Amino acid sequence: MRRATFGVLRLWIVPVALVLWELVTRMAGSPYFPPPTQIAGQLYDMWLSGPLSQLLLTDDALNTFGPSLGRLLAAWIIAGVLGVAFGVALGRIRGLADYADPVLQFLRALPPPLLVPIFFVLFKIGTPTQLAVIVFGVIWPVLVNTTDGCRAVDKGFLETARVFQFSRYDVLRRVILPAAMPKIFAGLRLSLSLALILMVVSELVGSNSGIGYSLLYAQQSYDYAGVWAHIVLLGVLGLLFNALFLVAEGRVLSWHANARRTV
Amino acid sequence: MLELVDLGHNYGSYRAIDRVNLKVAQGEVVCIVGPSGCGKSTLLRSIAGLIKPTGGTVLLDGKPVDGSPENLAVVFQDYSRSLYPWMSALANVSLPLRRRGLDKKKREAAAMNALDQVGLSGAAAKYPWEMSGGMQQRVSIARALAYQPKLLLMDEPFGSVDAQTREELEDLTLRVCAHHGMTILLITHDVDESVYVGDRVVVLSKAPGTVVGDLPVQLPGPRDQIHTRELEAFVRLRAEVGRLVRGITPYRNTHGYGVETR
């Protein structure tokens, strides 16, 4: 309770920052830096003046956010599944990591946006390519963390499993994966914030829907308040995703937080 | 039922145990005691199939052991690394029963029964980190009981709990094992404990560990922490084992409480 109150009190920084922002931009008077009130007005006009039945979201908002968030979540889930699967293999199959490492480090160093042309050729223009860009960009934190987590499973846990002759499936499902879960979640969280960035990037090139496309459109029509509205939107989305993720993590990993507190 | 023939193990050039010979009969409680670093844990890990001994053989029911044998359970010293913190006590106890081909209901019933026997029926839903060390080790014992192994290995099982809990757990082990007729091999560095718990005390020398004494414990049962420990026979045997552990040449007295050394 006290911590919650304290958390709310700490939010005083938000209005202070907003007021400062307003003052500075008004004094500067630059068309490239509209004051937050103007940005908020634009944000409201574009997306938040819809009917109650759509939770106040306008049709434009639904048509813009829908495809973007859909692709983001789909790509994040695909990357999560692939990253965990490969990470477990790399972490648990002795010697495999040594072979795979050079290739992985090479792939990891490639900036995903540069691969867009290649993905265009491999997949169709549109959603498949955008998914590929996001997946390729966000799989690494999950993969690396899962590999680490699976490699570092406490020997005691594994010996217990061996003595009681758990099946291979049980060892994986009930020992290795849960033991690696704190690391896997750390990777997934990093991936989620990266996915938001790559979602926008993937929509800036060869797309005709989504937040990135809409941002580009605003930019090209010299609607600077609109551009800023997109930026604010992305920040809020990032904040929201992180908060939701932490709630989910708290539920899945409650044993971990508690075990650490008592040890 | 368990026989060790010339069992030896080297870690590189370091010889941990050397030609250990031991026979354990069905239903016996054998304590292996020795100074720290005498290869007690190496011995246990060889039997459990967690390491492959570099020499000799382990026979279970006359068959050589390769890998982790069937029907064997271990209670490890470090319960915090042996109980899974992401599972409740009940789940920890019932998990090994999956391969016994029981359905979920039967597994949980067997696990509840085992938890009940160690006095934890009220804590089935608790997680290991919500329990004291003594309780966690009880869960480990319950897990072994529910598994119904023929052979139970205990590796310094009471080494990480306080003295009072230790006595409770010793009695608990004796009680449930008498009840199940389980064969137990308990490893300890505590001379007192070895005499109190064992039907037989086997003494290992310091590294390379080898059997230097094998003493039958003839104390009246059921054993009692206060009463048993004040018996003359207990005191004498404890002294005998203590000497062996410290490597002092055993003496033979005229009453025949001698020690046969190998």
Image (cartoon, coloured by chain):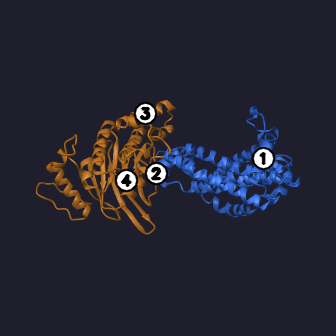
Please tell me whether mark 1 sits on a helix, a strand or a loop: helix
Q: Which chain is orange?
A: B
User: Which chain appears blue?
Assistant: A
Which subunit holds the residue at mark 4?
Answer: B
Q: Which mark is residue B4?
A: 4
Which residue does the numbered mark 1 point to in the structure image? A41
From the viewer's side, name the closer residue of B129 and A218. A218
Secondary structure of residue under mark 4: strand
Marks 4 and 2: which is nearer the front? 2
Nearer-N-terminus badge (1/2): 1
Badge 3: residue crowd in 10 Å (few <14, some 14–19, many ≥20): many
Q: CA distance from mark 4 to mark 2?
A: 44 Å
Residue at the spot 18% in from the left edge and 50% down from the top edge: B234
In the image, residue B135 sits, relative to residue B255, either above or below, namely above
- Viewer can see residue B114: no
What whole-number distance in Å separates the C-alpha atoms at marks 1 and 2? Answer: 46 Å
